[in-house]
Image (cartoon, rainbow, N blue to C red):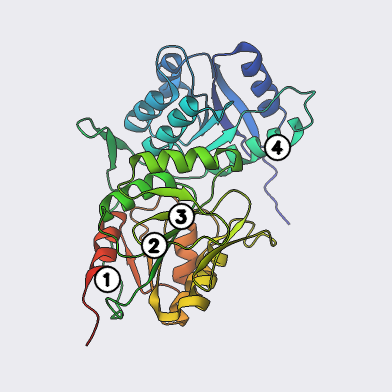
Amino acid sequence: MNNNNSPRRRIRVMIVEDSRPVREMLEYIIGNDPRLEVAAAVDSAEEALRRLQKVSPDVISMDIRLPGMNGFEATQRIMAEKPTPIVVVSASVESQELKISMNALRAGALSVMEKPVSTSHRDYADLAERLCTQLVIMSEVRVIRQRVRRHLGVHATTPAVAAASPSPMIPPAVGTFQMLGVVASTGGPNALVKLLGGLGTNVSVPVLLVQHITPSFMKGFVSWLDGISPLPVSEATDRQVPKAGQVYVAPADVHLVLERGCLRLENSAPVSVQRPSGTVLFRSMARSLGSKCLGVLLTGMGEDGAAGLRSVRDAGGYTIAEDETTAVVYGMPAAAVNMGAVCESLPLDEIAPRISQLLLAPAPV
């Protein structure tokens, strides 16, 4: 029995939204959730920055298309000046707004959500509940300060702690891999930009990717990633034969499976509350390729991908998890480490060079 009678503190939310009707609707939604309270509601990014230090919210609901400074620029400033968990709330999946949303994720925002529609809409209750739950979850993520590399237009993470000692390495069967699988969730878009950028264009195998993201934003995410990746990126299609040097992303709300050298899309039940699921992808790779597959598990909340990564390792493949020192959320990599699924834990910047080393090394004679 809990003898502490003091009420649990509500999570303080700052709303940044220029439309007054939408701002008032968000205030209503958040204010009526017993887990949350509205700490401030402002109509511009500039006003949010002015009030940020005084209000000190636990999490920010950030509109993207704002007068003056947009949500991407605001995210950059907030992550540089007072790092705070940010949930991007977007009304549109049109290309321009999607691009801003994806760049906000790249700048340090944690997730992107659909903006709730009017209270009379049939999806209102579901969208409102999902938004509030996302704000609660993301308020618990420990974000760290970002600095902007202006000449590149991207940011680099200032490590919060010193790098950990390398994990014990198991010698891989170098030069024999036929497929690379990558799974990511919260913090994934930014991590994927760095990973794919580090790999460059000289990738001798197909890359299969599962990224957890709000379904309505999946096509925009794929298009955005294709525009900034050195490798071509596309949504996977059923019965497609994957080609070396190309990235195939699991579409929204279906599992991506490798079967007899072809990509298959399956509508089976979610695994670890996810569809697409990283565990489903990794298990299919282990069944199809055994020791010839390479699995990488990046930042993310929950445990999806961990059991699948164990299947890859058990089949003789090689497995890498992002190290705690760089993962935005260490949930998925930690679950994999805890179940003995990981051959090697590496900081994000070291994963691409290691993959290149494994893929390009000559096969044993």
Q: Is residue 340 visible?
A: no
Report crowding for label 3: few under 14, some 14 to 19, many 20 or more residues within 10 A (C-alpha): many
Sequence-wise first label, 4 or 3 = 4
Q: Nearer the viewer, residue 279 or 220?
A: 220
* Rendering coords of residue 13 (x, y %): 56, 29
Nearer to us in this view, 220 or 147 = 220
Whether the residues at callouts 4 and 1 have beta carbons within 8 Å, the answer is no
- Residue 248's label in the rendered image is 3
Disc 4: which residue: 129
**Mark closest to the chain's N terminus, 4 or 1:** 4
**Disc 1 marks which amino acid?**
Leu
| Image marks 3 and 1: residues in contact by CB distance under 8 Å | no
Instruction: State whether residue 128 is above or below residue 353.
Output: above
- Secondary structure, mark 2, is loop
Kind of residue indicated by mark 2: Pro
Determine crowd level at label 4: few under 14, some 14-19, many 20+ residues with C-alpha closer than 10 A. some
**Residue lying at 55% horizontally and 28% vertically, measured from the top left:** 90
Question: Regarding mark 3 in the picture, which secondary structure is present there?
Answer: strand
Indicate which disc residue 358 carries.
1
Residue 65, numbered circle: none
Which of the two labelled residues, at mark 2 and mark 1, occupies the earlier sequence position? 2
Q: Are marks 3 and 2 in contact (CB under 8 Å)?
A: yes
**Residue at the spot of label 2:** 206
Q: Calculate the distance from the C-alpha at mark 2 to the C-alpha at mark 4.
A: 38 Å
Q: CA distance from mark 2 to mark 1?
A: 14 Å
Compared across the picture, whether 205 is left or right of 258 comes to left
Question: At 53% from the left edge and 27% from the top edge, which residue is drawn?
Answer: 94
Nearest to N terminus: mark 3 or mark 2:
2
Quadrant of image for the N terminus: bottom right
Which quadrant: the C terminus? bottom left
In this rendering, the answer to whether 168 lies above or below 331 is below
